[in-house]
Each structure stands twice: as C-alpha cells, then as structure tokens.
Amino acid sequence: MLTISNGLSAAFSLVMAPFVKLPLTGMIIISVLTGVLMLIIYKYTSNQDGITRAKDRIKAHFLAIMLYKDSLGVLLKSIGNILRWNAVYMAHQLRPLAVMIVPVLLLLVQLNFWYGYRPYQVGEEAVINVRVDKKVNLFETPATMTADEGVQVQTAAVRQPLSGEIAWRVKALTPGEHTLTIDVGGQTATKRFVVGDTQRLVRLAPQRHNGNFWDGLLYPGEKQLAGAITVVNVNYPGVEMNVLGWEMHWIIVYFVLSILFGLSMKGLFHVDI
Amino acid sequence: MSRNKITRRRFLQGLAAGTAGVALGCGDESNVSLPTATQDGTRVIVVGFDGLDPLLVRQWMDEGRLPNFSRLAQTGGFSSLGTSVPPQSPVAWSNFITGKNPGGHDIFDFIHRDPRTYLPFLSTSKTEAPEKFWHIGKYMIPSDSAGVKLMRKGKAFWEYLGEAGIPTTIFAVPSNYPPVEGPFRSLSGMGTPDLHGGYGSFSYFTDDPPQLAEGEEITGGNVYPVQVIEGQVKGKIIGPKNTFVEVAENDPAPDSEVPFNVFIDPTADTALLEVSDEQFVLQVGEWTDWVQLRFEMVPLVVTVKGMVRFLLKSVRPFKLYVSPINIDPREPAMPISTPPEYSAELCEARGGPFHTQGIPEDTKALSSQVFDNKEFLEQAHSVLAERLDLYHYELDRFQDGLLFFYFSSSDQITHMFWRTMDHDHPAYVPEKDEAFTNVVRDTYERFDKILGEAMEKLDDKTTLLVMSDHGFAPYYKSFHLSTWLLDNGYVKLRDPSDRDSEFLQNVNWWGTKAYTLGINSMYLNLIGREGKGVVGAADADRLLDEIREKLLQVVDPETGRHVISHAYKGSEVYQGEYAKNAPDLVIGYARGYRGSWETALGKFPRGSLLRPNTDEWGGDHCMAAEEVPGSLFASKPIELVGASLVDLPVTILELFGLPRPNDMIGKNVFTGK
C-alpha cells in the first residue's frame, strides 16, 4: 500500500506541476479526470443491463401510479414495486462503489496534500510534535531539535514521558523548503518544513512516520522513519479554496465538479448510471 | 448573611447575567453608508492620551526629551486643560464627548447608586436581560433580544458630524459602550466589559497559591489552585454564566467553561499548552498570542466566543496567568463597534485580534502580585503595540473629516509606575522598583513619536489637537471617608462589629444622615429620594455645609497638610437635566491623597483614617479637579484662557463649519468665543 501510495504521490506531483500557480484550474482538470475514471470503473464493474432494467421498472411503476391513481390496489402495488426495484438498483451500485472507493480514497489523500494545507508564512510560529517508541525513557533521554537557517527553533523540548511525545516551537524565517533535524538520545530523524507563498500550490505532507499501514496510506510522500523516532508531525495550517470569491473546503469543490463532469460525460462513454 | 445580602462578586456577576443573552442579538451587518468626503477637504486629527499630565510634559519638554510636543507647542499652542468634577475618566471623557458637564450627561462617578435601594451599579452601561423565553428541555432560549444600554446621556459631538456628512472615525473613546450608532466608524473604549460583564477579571492557575493575610483578598481576578500530576495540569477557564440553563429561582446560573491541559517537561522550563484544539509550546516567561475560546451555552445552537492570552510564569512551582476573557473583535459577542463589522475590519488590517476590554492593561494583576513589574509592562506594551498597528492603519487611510484616536497606556502606566519614579512614595521598594524608574518618562517619549507621525499629516487644511482627560498626581495616602462619616456620627451601622461588608450592606439607614459610594461621591440620606431617607429638605443644605466645613478641616497628622482641598456641592457645580442625580457633595482631595478603595466599595475600615498607600497603584487623579488638569496641544494658537474639556467638541464642530448646539456649554479654543 505504501509503495502504491508513494507512486501515486510522484505521479500526482507530475500532474500538478503545471498548475502550481493555477489552483482552481488544477482542481477542474483533476475533477474531469476523476469523472472519466469513475465512469470507466462504473461501466466495467456495474451490471449495466441490471441497472437499466431496474430504472425501467421504476419508471413503469411511476407511470402506473399516474394512470391508475383512482385504483387503490394498483397504487399500493406500484409503490411497493418502486421500493423493491429501488432496492435492486441500490444493490447494483454496491460493486462499482466498492471498487471505486480505493482509488477515490487514494486521490483524496493526494489532493489533501495539495489543497488541504498551506505552507507557513514568514514570521509564523509552528508546533512540531514527535512521537517516540515507548521503550524510550523520556524522563532521562535528552531531546533536541535543530534546523537550517530558514527556521528558528524557539524553545527547548517539552517531553511527555507518559505518552512518549515531544513538542517544540519553531518560527519560519525565510521562504523555501527547510529541514528540521530531531535528535532523541542519539537517534535522529529529519522532516521537511515548507515556508512560502500561500498563493502557489505546494505539496505538503504534515507527517513523517515509520510506515505502519494506516500512516502509510494517509501520509505518504516522505521516506519512512527508522529507529526510536516513530512520527514527526508538522501541523500545517488548513486552508480553504477560493471559488469565485467564495471560501469553501476543497473536498466540496472536488466532489461537486467530479459529479457534474461525470454526469455530463455519461452519454459519451455509453454508461447508464 | 442575610438573604438579600450582595457581595462584590455577586454584584459583578449580576452585571454579567445578560452577557450570553446579548450575544444572540449581536453581529448584524450595518446598512448605513458612510460619508467619504467633506466639501472643502477640512481635516481634524484628535489624539487622546489618557492622563497625559501637563506638568510632566512640560518637565520633559524642557529637558528636550519630547521634540514633537515641543515643536507643536511652539508652532501652535500648549496649555493645561480643565478637567471634570470629579476628574475620573468616564466623567471627563463624557464631558469631552457631549460638551456638557455631568449634569447634562449623567455620568458622575465610576459607580452610581440606586437611591431607592442604595445598591451600586456601574455608571456607563447597563445590561438588560431578555424577558421572554422558549423553554426547550433544560434550556431557555430568549425569544426577544437582550440589550446593552449606554447610560451616558446627551448627543455625542460626532453624531452632528455624521448628520452633516463628514467622514468620522472615533477610535476607542471611553464612555462609549455600546457605541452610539450612526454614519461613522467607532470602536468602543473604556467601559467595554470583558466576557464576564465586568471591567476585566484574570484567572491564575497555580500549585503555589499566594498566602493572604486575614481579610486580605485578591481583587480583579480569581486564583485557582491546581495540582501537577505526573507532569500534567488540568484546568478550566470559567466563562460567562450560562443563563440559557433553567435553574431554580434562587440558584445561580452555572458557569460556562473551556478546559485546558498543560504538559510540563521533566527538567526544562518549558510546557505544552493544549486548549480549544490548539497547541502552544511556551518557555517560562512567554505569552501565547490570542486564543479563541468557545463557550457552549446550548449545544449546537448558542456558543459565545471570547479570547484570552496565557502567560507561563513558572513551571516549578506551576504558575499560569490567563488574561480576562476579551470580546473577540472578529466575532463580537457584544456590540463593540459601529458599524458592527468595523471591529473585524480592524482585525483584518492588523492581521489578528486585539484587546477589546475597556481598560486592557491588567493593573489588578500587578496590585495582586500575580504580575511583577516586568510582566505588567510586557502586557501593557503589547496593548500599545496593537494600538499602534491600528493607529497606523487609520492614519494611513485618513483623507478627510475627523479622526479621533485614543491611547490608554499613559493613564494605566502612570497609575502603576508613578511610585517607581517618585522615590518618596510609600510603595517604592528600591530592590524591585529602581530598574523601572523611567517607565513613565519612556512612555511619554513613545507618545512623542506617535505624535510625530500625526504631525506628518499636517497641512493648511488639517488641524491637530492632542488632549488628555486629566493629569496625574502622587497617591501617597488613602482617606477612609466612610469611616470618617461613621466616626462623626453621620452613619450608623446595624452591627457595629461588622465593618467589612461591602456596598453599605451593614448600614442602619434609619440612623444614617450621609453616606459615600464611589471614589469621590457623597450623598445625603434624603427623605423622598432615598428609600429610607431621614434628612428633610429643609435640613439638607445646613447639613451639607456642616459636613463640608468639617471635611475641609481634616488634617494629616504626620504632615499637617489638609487632606481635602475642595468639597463641591453638586447643586453648585452641575447644571442640566440630570443634575438631580448628582452626588450631594463631590470630594476634591488634595494632591497626594485619595479616597480609599474601601470607601469606594462602601466598607468602613478600622484604625487610622489615613493609610499609607503601599499598593502598586501609586499615581492617581481622583482628587480635586484643580490638582490634576489635563493637557491640550494644538497645531494652531490657543486663544481661550482656561480651556476645558467641554470646549473641545464646540471647537471641532466649528472647525467643520457646523453650528454650536445650544446645549453645549463650551467655547471655541481657537477663537476664545
């Protein structure tokens, strides 16, 4: 999973490269591609005949309701049949949805790195959280953080021995990609820390980790940690998308656009939804 | 304790009762369009430095420390500026705002009393609780809006400017909460409460609570003892009373609260603070920026937002200061600006929120030893830094009309650091205060730079006025006026052994001829006006004369100096529609003396009538008006001899060519007429 996810990260970076200065255009292109991908998946994983039949039956029973609205028996029977065929229709959706959910989840993870966060701005302060292996005795083990010239480490570590966590405060000094170096009892780890322009799209990975399944799925992109330091977290500020002057979460924009593009192209791909 | 007994805490809680309800009716955007230009391009800038003292300014101008003040005095004018009777900020600024004396604007003291019940209330604003509710489960949701009412009467001078279409911005003038509405921009100043509805109450979480002597109490905040367990501290910030929860008639509404956690490093002086889904790593001595707190009153329906700053004073022992909960100007829970969106616009301009509490410098924390000198100064400087951001924003965009901008630091810093520059002061402790000898002077020098920036705007169409509401004097000794009235037989107590009950709760009114409440106010217990009056109208004048004569004879046995230099009869010094509400006697203390805090709160302290003031609050102005005039600088020659606060609104209106309203009693300082 981690390999797929990291591969996707690299592919996504290539796709997004032309759009770093055009976030909305990038989102539209991704939504079009998503719409096409979903249509193709839907076409080949769903029972198209079954779906067509279920929809036809539903339409027929609606027609019966209109024609025989004075006949209570027909009316009740038609309503029952609408519900039954609707259940059949929903059942036909399960397989394509089960197949789609995997690529959609991976896409959402990738999109969140591009659209979900913004880099720190010059002068802004950040809290860096680190988790260490429970075997490390933080009562006695020193912890330090250093950074390159673009970042100032402002505090000594706050070690929380019971939870195995450590925190520092840093301040962004100059734009660019910087490296934080953490040393816990001689074991070291680094983490990318981005300071920069909030108008440009930048891929931001809030977490570097030691590669367990879920962390690998949710936070791909940086090399796995090894040793006692298991997670390094940079809490990049969340950001909303500006769509024609409206601020909204990117996921709303993404789903609305993907669905609209998918629906508008279903005839082109001969897909019955 | 009797059933109706009111404590100071309950008094303040009462003020806060409507806070949450007010939040429901707040935040609507205004549809009023603001004027953009005058016809002839006239511009007036008024910079208000609260408490800027003319003697100190003169001294430091003579020493060459205030070049901009000196230049303005040479090219225009400089004089002392007559203040109000009494020279308290809400009273003085109301004189400035309305062009009337207190008889016309109805603000006579920080604290007023209801003559029928003798109960005190804050003079400048009143929160009115909603009357109708929907009852849903354990909650009661107001169906009509609660309101905050400005108690100052009389029209503000900028209302005339707004009516005349003159662009006007009024930044944080005191005695303007809630701000009057109209076609202008204004942010409320002194008088704006914290989220509890009072003048500001800090929270202090510690595992080493201060050891207080018997009868001693920490005022202005609450101390919460906490325990450090395995490097972790858990606490709750207490918010406004949740008046949405239905309770039995005599039960208090429950507190709203926001929890927080602090994790302390095992050896280093650092800690991680977690509050409201945010994290802050702090070293000892560091502050957080503003943290928004959301107090949930009715789940998913009503949330009241406020904001605080934390100071990690120490980790071993643990000491965490939390500022009073300020109204968040981004989403104000109570009305603090006109138009309502102006406060959010100011946040946008400076890239973050700012103190909105009317008196933002936390003097009580210093007086209570929760702050030391350095910490107080840091906090006061942060207030000033925010103000400067907003000053630059307003000054940069100022093109036309009137800009009034207010700075509080001169007042609050002089209150707290007079003792450090006056080495004869009873509160001066060389070991801790010597390094702070020049704090007041440094503040005046900063103001000189601020003035210089306003002077850069001067041209032939621009007039600059720099003014203060009063000056300053040392506060060496406190006089227990209440005890003096008791000792002289004018007050009778129900229980003579109880001298500490606040707000006159222990007074036997049927045996009391005169009483005092507030810092300078004294009242007769008049038949027909007071609820249990005993003094007839025919005896009132004679009694007042008798008390006045006796008070003017009070002498400090240590120095031989008179303690009181003036005692003004309300009927003689106030004119106007509301003069009937005035105190009967306003006490004008001589330089160096002031009414004690206990007197202001209606207690009757034992012992000597005069007590050396060892409080950090070592400078003051609640004395005779003649002792503490304010300052007036202008970019044009000042022709009026003996100018006073009520002259300024007349002057400003006439600079814009507007007629002088009939009820303003002042003159034009530039024409002398």
Image (cartoon, rainbow, N blue to C red):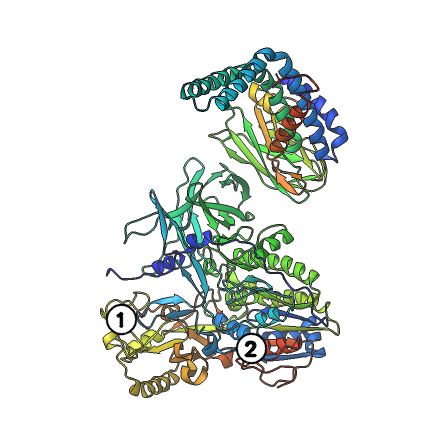
What kind of residue is marked 2? Leu
Instruction: State the image quarter where residue A129 is shown.
Output: top right
- The answer to which quarter of the image holds residue B7 is bottom left
Q: Earlier in the sequence, mark 2 or mark 1?
A: 1
Up-down relation of residue B513 to residue A131 (above or below) = below
Q: Position of residue B629 (x, y in %)?
A: 54, 78
Q: Position of residue B219 (x, y in %)?
A: 40, 59
Letter of the chain that mark 1 sits on in the rendering: B
Q: Is residue B47 left or right of residue B21?
A: right
Residue B382's label in the rendered image is: none
**Nearest to the observer: residue B205 or residue B339:** B339
Screen quadrant of the N terminus of chain B: bottom left
| Label 2: how many Cα within 10 Å (few below 14, some 14–19, many 20+) | many
Residue on which the image places disc 1: B507
Q: Residues within 10 Å of mark 1 (few under 14, many from 20)?
A: many
| Location of residue B299 with respect to B104 vertically, above or below | above
Q: Position of residue B325 (x, y in %)?
A: 47, 52
* Residue B455 visible in this rendered orientation of the protein: yes
Quarter holding the C terminus of chain B is bottom right
Answer yes or no: is residue A191 visible: no
Residue B672, quarter of the rendered image = bottom right
Residue at the far right in the pictured view: A18
Q: Which residue is mark 2?
A: B645
Alpha carbons under labels 2 and 1: distance apart: 37 Å
Asked if the residue under mark 1 is in contact with the one under mark 2, i.e. CB atoms within 8 Å, the reply is no
| Element assignment for label 2 | loop
SS class, disc 1: loop
**Disc 2 is attached to a residue of which chain?**
B
Residue at (47% x, 64% y) in the render: B616
Q: Viewer-nearest of labels 2 and 1?
A: 2
